[in-house]
Amino acid sequence: MDCKMFIFTAPSGAGKTTVVKHILSKYDMLDFSVSATTRSKRPHEIQGKDYIFMTVAEFKEKVANGDFVEWEEVYPDQFYGTLRAEVDRVWNMGKTLGI
């Protein structure tokens, strides 16, 4: 299988989610990997859909276990990252990954 990955990066508030949602609505062969974060969940957000919310201790444990393909501490004790399990989930469906 020829697996591909698209990574969208930009500062907070730049419109990454809007662009990705539009692209995903146009192309069935793409799917989105849900990022993990330690930041607080906002009222409109859904666990496992918008983000995978976890505590700092849970996040650090997953880092230590090698469960992330990439991660960053954006602010003190506020981490974001892409779980290997999310990448595998999308690739196992035979889709191209958008991060």
Image (cartoon, rainbow, N blue to C red):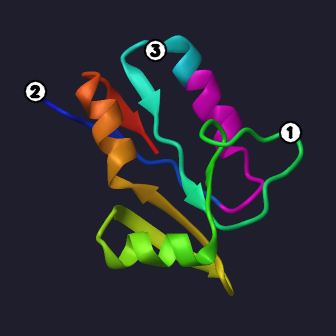
Of badges 1 and 3, nearer the viewer stands 1
* Residue 76 drawn above or below residue 65: below
> Magenta segment, which residues?
11-23
- Please, what secondary structure does the residue beneath circle 1 have? loop
Does residue 14 sit above or below 6 in this rendering? below
Residue 15 within the segment the image draws in magenta:
yes
> Is residue 43 part of the magenta span, yes or no?
no
Judge from the rendering whether residue 12 lies leftward or rightward of residue 36; answer left or right. right
User: Which residue in the rendered view is the most extreme toward the right?
Assistant: 43
Q: CA distance from mark 1 to mark 3?
A: 26 Å
Prevailing SS of the magenta stretch:
helix
Residue at numbered disc 2? 1
> Crowdedness of circle 2 by 10 Å Cα count: few (<14), some, many (20+)?
few
The x, y position of residue 97, in whole percent, is 37, 35
Q: Which residue corresponds to mark 3?
A: 27
Provide residue 72's location: percent of width, then percent of height. 51, 74
User: Relative to the observer, which residue lies in front, 85 or 7?
Assistant: 85
Secondary structure under the numbered disc 3 in the rendered image: loop
- Foreground mark, 2 or 1, reads 1
| Point 29% across, 70% down: residue | 66
Residue at position x 79%, y 62% in the image: 40
Find disc 1 in the rendering and name its residue: 44
Q: Residue at x 53, y 70 (%)?
A: 58
